[in-house]
Image: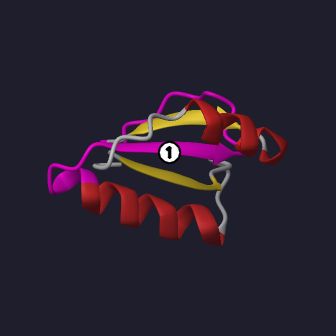
Amino acid sequence: MIVYFSDFDLRGSGYMGIGVKLCQGLADRGRDVLVFGMGYKGQPHDYGFRLCPARFKSIPQIMKVLPTAPDI
């Protein structure tokens, strides 16, 4: 699993544009991609990866609950 944190406000941003291309490319190659999107509010999307709303201040808590398996 690949975990990616970035700005993902669906109104568009430079970071989101880069992140979508990167994560979609990885998903197209069969990778399991989980994105924590700052600014994403849970709107429907058609990306080939999982996208979860997150806030910057939540990153430490998210990191604590993610699995720590060697393949992440």
Q: Secondary structure at mark 1?
A: strand
Tell me what residue is drawn at x 62 percent, y 42 percent: 63
Which residue occupies the extreme right position in the image? 57
Question: In terms of depth relative to the viewer, which is nearer, 68 or 7?
Answer: 68
Marker count (numbered): 1
Rendering coords of residue 15 (x, y %): 62, 68
Tell me what residue is drawn at x 67 percent, y 40 percent: 40
Tell me what residue is drawn at x 58 percent, y 61 percent: 16
Rendering coords of residue 39 (x, y %): 74, 45
Instruction: Name the chief secondary structure element in magenta.
Output: loop
- Residue 12 placement: quadrant: bottom right
Name the kind of residue labelled 1 in the image.
Val
Tell me what residue is drawn at x 49 percent, y 37 percent: 51
Rendering coords of residue 9 (x, y %): 68, 49
Magenta stretch: give its range.
Answer: 27-48
Please tell me whether residue 15 belongs to the stretch shown in magenta: no
Rendering coords of residue 68 (x, y %): 44, 40
At label 1, counting other C-alpha atoms closer than 10 Å, the crowd grade (few under 14, some 14-19, many 20 or more) is: many
Report the quarter where the N terminus lies.
top left
Q: In this figure, which residue is indicated by the disc labeled 1? A: 35
Question: In terms of depth relative to the viewer, which is nearer, 68 or 54?
Answer: 68
Which residue occupies the extreme left position in the image? 30
Left or right position of 25 against 6: left
Please tell me whether residue 31 belongs to the stretch shown in magenta: yes
- Which colour style is shown? secondary structure
